[in-house]
């Protein structure tokens, strides 16, 4: 039998990380993702104690996070649980909802700033067509970035995440690192 080795979305044995001045971009292969959709007439659940957010919102607590993806639909994320069957665990606590595993379909890139929120805001201004001043902490949206559809999560003032399809992980990394590199050159 062939020895199989797990690789990240960018094709390496370990997650990629790169620093551009105050900004650090890193691949996060440890986040488990599962979509949750309500069935007709179902009450909005509180999976693992988490209150699901309204459109444009991002919620976190009890070791999981969630963001709204459409009417009666959310993406649920769990840090450090990508190696588990997170969707099955979620389905156990919300049997009245439709739950689908999403972990291997997406790539998650985290961007943090060591200089507060200004570098994150400047990066968002370069990358996406949304008003960074109105896209504060605990915000989430789906938007276009270099002809790719991505989810942008503003985890805190100095932390933002981009979720894109795993099949264009390289293109998304290139777009993010190029923009961060150009901001570093301007500083």
Image (cartoon, rainbow, N blue to C red):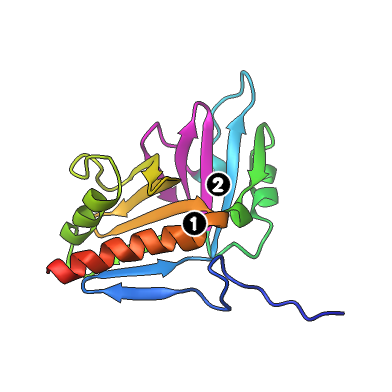
Is residue 51 visible in the rendered image? The answer is no
Q: In which quadrant of the rendered image does the N terminus lie? A: bottom right
Front residue (pair 122, 93):
122
Q: Which residue is mark 2?
A: 48
How many neighbours does mark 2 have within 10 angstroms: few (below 14), some (14-19), or many (20 or more)? some
Secondary structure of the residue carrying numbered label 1: loop
Q: Residue at x 64, y 25 (%)?
A: 39
Position of residue 25 measured from the top left corner of the image (x, y, whole percent): 35, 68
Label 2 vs label 1: CA separation? 9 Å
Count of residue discs: 2
Magenta-colored stretch includes residue 135: no
Q: Which badge, 2 or 1, is on the more N-terminal residue? A: 2
Q: Residue at x 69, y 57 (%)?
A: 85
Q: Which residue is mark 1?
A: 63
Front residue (pair 113, 137):
113
* CB within 8 Å, label 2 to label 1: yes
């Amino acid at each position: 039998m062939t020895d199989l080795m797990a690789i990240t979305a960018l094709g390496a044995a370990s997650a990629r990380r790169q620093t551009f001045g105050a900004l650090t971009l890193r691949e996060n292969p440890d986040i488990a993702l599962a979509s949750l959709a309500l069935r007709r007439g179902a009450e909005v659940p509180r999976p693992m104690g988490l209150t699901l957010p309204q459109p444009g919102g991002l919620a976190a607590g009890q070791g999981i996070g969630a963001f709204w993806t459409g009417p009666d639909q959310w993406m649920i994320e769990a840090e450090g649980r990508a190696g588990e069957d997170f969707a099955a665990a979620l389905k156990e606590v919300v049997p009245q909802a439709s739950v689908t595993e999403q972990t291997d379909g997406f790539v998650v890139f985290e961007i943090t700033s060591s200089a507060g929120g200004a570098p994150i805001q400047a990066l968002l201004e370069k990358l996406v067509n949304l008003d960074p001043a109105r896209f504060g902490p605990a915000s989430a949206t789906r938007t276009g970035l270099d002809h790719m559809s991505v989810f942008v999560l503003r985890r805190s003032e100095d932390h933002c995440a981009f979720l894109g399809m795993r099949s264009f992980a390289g293109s998304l990394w290139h777009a993010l690192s190029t923009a961060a590199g150009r901001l570093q050159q301007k500083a």
